Image: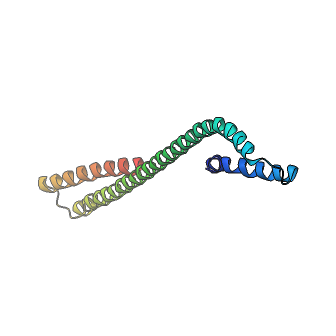
Amino acid sequence: MKILDYLNAFPGLVQEFLDYGASKLFGGDVDFSMQERFLRTILDGAREKMMSATTLLEGLEQVKQRKWEQERSAESATIRAVAMMASQSEVKRKSGVSSLVICLICLAPIWPLFQLGFVNRYVIGVVAVLALAGVIFLFRAIIRLTKG
């Protein structure tokens, strides 16, 4: 951006340096009309080159701004993706813990049912259902906790 400022101020700098140098060298004998013609011929050629350089620098500044915006949007997308993955991991962990709790709730009454001494087909059916549900939730908890 400073280069662009310099190129915009360049014509005035040339005029100031030439005036200063001419007044130091020649004192009051300076022909300002001849100096003006000389400056005009030099600056006309330089002005075209400066305009193309200025246009190029402005284009580079716009490209730089677009690249910066793309990087920011990519960074924010990455941050959102990481946050979503962390959230999903937390959900899986909570699901795994709750599956483990359900497993323990299903398996806990099996031993007391056998201790009661009632061994008939209804008790064995309830024990089988509780054991099956407990095993299913145990495997579900293991899967959720190891993947999350």
Return the residue nearer the eye: 53 or 87: 53
Residue shown at 20%/62% (left/top)? 117
Return the residue nearer the eye: 148 or 55: 55
Say above or below: 46 vs 18. Answer: above
- In the picture, measured across the screen, residue 30 lies left or right of residue 67, that is right
Residue shown at 53%/41% (left/top)? 59
Percent coordinates x, y for residue 34 in the rendering: 74, 42
Percent coordinates x, y for residue 118 in the rendering: 17, 60
Render colour scheme? rainbow
Return the residue nearer the eye: 77 or 5: 5
Return the residue nearer the eye: 62 or 87: 62
Percent coordinates x, y for residue 129 in the rendering: 19, 52
Count of numbered labels shown in the rendering: 0
- In the picture, measured across the screen, residue 49 lies left or right of residue 134, that is right
Percent coordinates x, y for residue 98 in the rendering: 31, 59
Say above or below: 31 vs 107. Answer: above
- In the picture, measured across the screen, residue 14 lies left or right of residue 105, that is right
- In the picture, measured across the screen, residue 64 lies left or right of residue 124, that is right
